[in-house]
Amino acid sequence: MGQGSAYDQLHRNIVIRSDIYGGMDSKPRILAASSGFRGIISIPGLSGSNGIILASAAGAGIVADLVDRDPAAPLRNITSGTPITGVQGAGFSNSMSSETLMDAMPIEFSHPVLPSTVLPQNFRIHLNTGEIVTPLYAAQSPNNDLNERQTVVVYGYFGNRLPSSDPNSLYPVLFEVVSSNTPLQLITPLGLVNGSGLSHSSNNPYDPYNGPTLVGAKLSRLSLAGDYPTPAFAYSIANHGVEYYGTGSNLYRLRLFTSAGFSPDGVSGFEPQEFSRFFQLTAQAPGRRGRSVTISQADQAIPVRGGTLKVKGIADLGTGLSADPSYTYSEDHDNQFDIIVEASSPEAIRTLQTVILPDPRTGTHSPIYNPGGPGTAPRPQFNYTQPSGGQTIAIEQALEDPATVSYAAQSLGAYDSADDLAVAFRLRDRITGEWRVTSSSANANALVASGSWRLVDVPFATNANDSYVTDVVALHNRSRNDTIYSADQRQIRQLEGAGYTNEGTVFKAYNAPLYGLDPIWQMSSPGGQHLLASSPQEQLHWQSKGWSTDGIAFYSVSFPNSTAAEGWAA
């Protein structure tokens, strides 16, 4: 069966450990609605380095010295302009776009957005002339990781490249969420909330030093949970902080949430070792209270109150820490960066206070542009977006409670027919009582169509694609009407020797209790059948029915809305 289209994958209602900005009790709101950049989405004829002159002619920034390299540089490293095929390939449409030279506008929400409700009809953009525009396309790309679902990007025609001081300038001044038959929904700890009526002012990035900003800076323990995309978006595989810097309990993630993609020139990406080029942090200094210390370099242990802090580097960029040749390193160009910090003590990490984007006019740090910036070879006839003018933002500490939310649609009809989804479907045979789990919606639908099986729920996440995952195999005993799922090689061999048939890998999960993961328990009935329990509530339910807990089968992330539904109790 394979996977669905990029559009279908991006619109599946799956969110895993996605951040809430402002605290678990906060109400959903829009954090920023930058008016983005003009005219470089869906450039006719742009395809590989042979079309770079077309990107430049459309006003897209280019990095001239990467053209015609051998081996070739990725197209996104050469230009921020996108080809016509990019609209469909990035998940904005299920068909080829007929629109060309579109504008892009990113919108950042405090809470993750329910992916299936990211639809153009739910948004309106008010221009400075009073005109109201409906976007042509909407998606969450390039924020494709399952813990990055707070950003919506819309394509359409929203203005020109003139600064606000020009009487002919045209630009967005307000972004609004409007009601529709499928209204925008935001995911909160208490369930889904209708986003209709939310709004936020916009600005003109062609005004001097009115470039992208930070809209959030959230500190929590380092976790890999949910930090992976679906298969259509392979460029952001294995790029989280755990993959880069390991699983140490003294490692922390300072997630920077941006109003637009950050770039030193509008095209080039960031690299893991470039902290000192773009950022500074402040923390409480040792000794007398009220004093601060500035952290300007990575890999230096800086004394702070209660110990030391060391910036390890930046994560959530490209696959791995480097590439060979270096110009082929390709980051994912989304709205998140993670600064990974090593702390000598819990007290030390709590001293972090602010993130600073130094003003580029001082000459000490690189400018930061959105993807409409000039690149290295700007054309004089075009205006390009302006750099940020510098910023200081307070750090939101989420050390005790990471303030994240997970969610998965609980009906088969909510999923396209595909294999290897990021969720597990749990089914039970009405006649024999056997339980089965699969990450294939196609297989789940086939079982339900056979007549005796019913979908119980969608209890936990599957199929992360980093180097820490392991295979979970199904072992089936037909005479017992029993299937056991295991990631333990010793147990697998024992079950094979006891008459169970190894049916192969059914999905991937984790075999270690890494931070942010939940245990998935193996349980057995008095009659010898087995099931997987994904929550303490479910475990207690089955124990009350005489079932016993055999131990932890593997680790994943459970979906609270599955537990709340209690489909397993029926």
Image: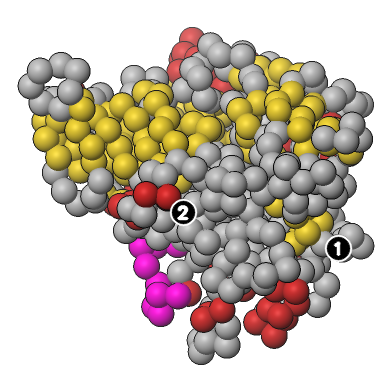
Check disc 1 and report its element: helix, strand or loop.
loop
- Cα separation, mark 2 vs mark 1, equals 29 Å
Residue at (57, 17) in percent of width and height? 189
Count of residue discs: 2
Q: Which is the main secondary structure of the residues drawn in magenta? A: loop
Residue under circle 2? 367
Q: Is residue 453 above or below residue 198?
A: below
Give the camera-side residue of 317 and 4: 317
Asked whether residue 33 is drawn in magenta, I would say no
Taking depth in this image into account, of 241 and 204 the one nearest to the observer is 204
Observer-nearest of 48 and 526: 48
Can you give x and y, in whole percent of width and height, for residue 131 in the image?
Answer: 91, 35
Of callouts 2 and 1, which one flags the residue occurring earlier in the amino acid sequence? 1
Is label 2 or label 1 in front?
2
Q: Is residue 346 left or right of residue 332?
A: left
Inspect this view and state whether residue 5 appears. Answer: no
| Residue 122 shows in this picture | yes
Up-down: is 567 above or below 92? Answer: above
| Residue 375: image location, x then y, percent | 57, 67
Local crowd size for mark 1, using a 10 Å CA cut-off: few (<14), some (14–19), many (≥20): some
Q: Residue at x 23, y 50 (%)?
A: 297
Label 1 is placed on what type of residue?
A: Thr
The answer to whether mark 2 and mark 1 are in CB contact below 8 A is: no
* Residue at image location 86% in from the left, 28% down from the top: 182
Q: Position of residue 294 (x, y in %)?
A: 23, 37
Label ID, residue 249: none
Mark carried by residue 100: 1
Q: Which residues are magenta?
A: 319-327
Q: Residue at x 59, y 51 (%)?
A: 386
In the image, taking residue 467 as reference, residue 428 lies left or right, namely right
Q: Quadrant of the N terminus?
A: bottom right
